Image (cartoon, rainbow, N blue to C red):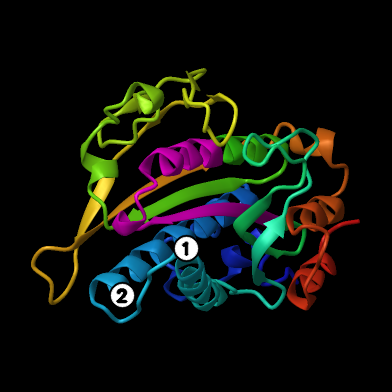
């Protein structure tokens, strides 16, 4: 008898017992791992939406990147657990996880950069990974030039993660300063670090912070991007608003087997070499 998380099991169940968006029972030949990656994307996107609704409604207070990370990870864990349909499925969230790379990350010039949030979601012989970089910029801190550079550096880091072994990546930026969303940089030093709504970055673009005080070297982006900011009204306030930018990209599968030979090694590497009990439970069901 096939296991609960085996696509063939859905052929033997009446459709009214199935989730409306789970179509394995209609097409057993579909790749279950792709469906799992879609679930992972939905979890992250919905978690970000819920978090911003709670912030806008003043149910939670976010005043720095650490609190943004804390509240997002809480929602991710709660929502992700609702997607654990089979007895072997596990949803794992880890914070400030060092990712071991074959190359050197543009941000920090390190081969073991730390991702703000890393997720592993899996069961049986299938699992997917996701890395999230978070930014929270306060208007009063007045570091717009350095902050713009950090956003581009995070995009470059996420590209490197996807090229090696991370399946899904998200960059999420929140700020109470409309400058990032509404205006391009005015000075010559940061003219290339535009984040304003509607700004497009073609693939292969190199951006440079032209200053002696630049926090890093020029950054080359392999993917193309177009920035679109969302505006959130804060309950009880008539002036202050929150602006958010979310950039999602999916990685390919072609290079995974070349760089990391086994699923166990790939998951261990994605979680920084430190496996929680939940992550170890995933490994119990991964083909050696």
Structural crowding at the residue carrying mark 2, measured as other residues with C-alpha within 10 Å and reported as few (<14), some (14–19) or many (≥20): some
Q: Is residue 65 magenta?
A: no
- Secondary element at image label 2: helix
Residue 30 visible in the displayed image? no
**Residue farthest along the right direction in this orientation:** 288
Left or right position of 261 against 75: right
> Which of 15/179 is in front?
179
Mark 1, residue position: 65
Tell me what residue is drawn at x 46 percent, y 71 percent. 67
Task: Report the residue at 68% width, 63% height from top.
Answer: 122
Q: Which residues are magenta?
A: 127-155
Residue 57 coordinates in the image, percent (x, y)? 23, 76
Tell me: residue 238, above or below residue 78.
Answer: above
- The residue shown at (51%, 70%) is 76
Quick check: 29 left or right of 39?
Answer: right
User: To which residue does mark 2 refer?
Assistant: 54
Q: Residues within 10 Å of mark 1 (few under 14, many from 20)?
A: some
Which numbered marker is on residue 207?
Answer: none
């Amino acid at each position: 008898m096939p296991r609960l998380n085996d696509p063939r099991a859905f052929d033997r169940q009446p459709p009214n017992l199935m989730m409306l968006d789970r179509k394995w029972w209609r097409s057993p030949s579909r790749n279950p791992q792709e469906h799992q990656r879609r679930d992972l994307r939905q979890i992250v996107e919905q978690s970000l939406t819920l978090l911003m609704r709670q912030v806008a409604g003043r149910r939670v207070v976010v005043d720095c990147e650490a609190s943004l990370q804390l509240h997002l990870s809480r929602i991710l864990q709660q929502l992700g657990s609702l997607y654990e349909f089979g007895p072997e499925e596990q949803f794992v969230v880890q914070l400030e996880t060092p990712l071991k790379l074959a190359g050197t990350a543009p941000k920090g010039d390190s081969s073991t950069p730390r991702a703000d949030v890393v997720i592993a979601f899996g069961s049986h012989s299938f699992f997917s990974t996701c890395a999230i970089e978070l930014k929270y910029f306060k208007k009063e801190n007045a570091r717009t030039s350095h902050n713009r550079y950090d956003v581009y550096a995070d995009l470059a880091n996420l590209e490197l993660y996807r090229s090696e072994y991370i399946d899904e990546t998200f960059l999420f930026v929140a700020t109470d300063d409309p400058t990032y969303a509404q205006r391009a940089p005015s000075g010559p030093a940061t003219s290339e670090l535009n984040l304003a709504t509607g700004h497009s970055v073609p693939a292969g673009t190199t951006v440079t912070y032209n200053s002696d005080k630049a926090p890093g070297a020029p950054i080359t982006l392999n993917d193309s991007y177009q920035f679109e900011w969302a505006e959130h009204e804060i309950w009880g306030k008539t002036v202050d608003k929150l602006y958010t930018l979310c950039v999602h990209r999916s990685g390919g599968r072609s290079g995974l087997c070349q760089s990391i030979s086994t699923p166990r090694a790939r998951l261990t590497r994605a979680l920084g070499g430190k496996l929680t009990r939940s992550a170890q439970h995933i490994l119990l069901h991964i083909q050696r």
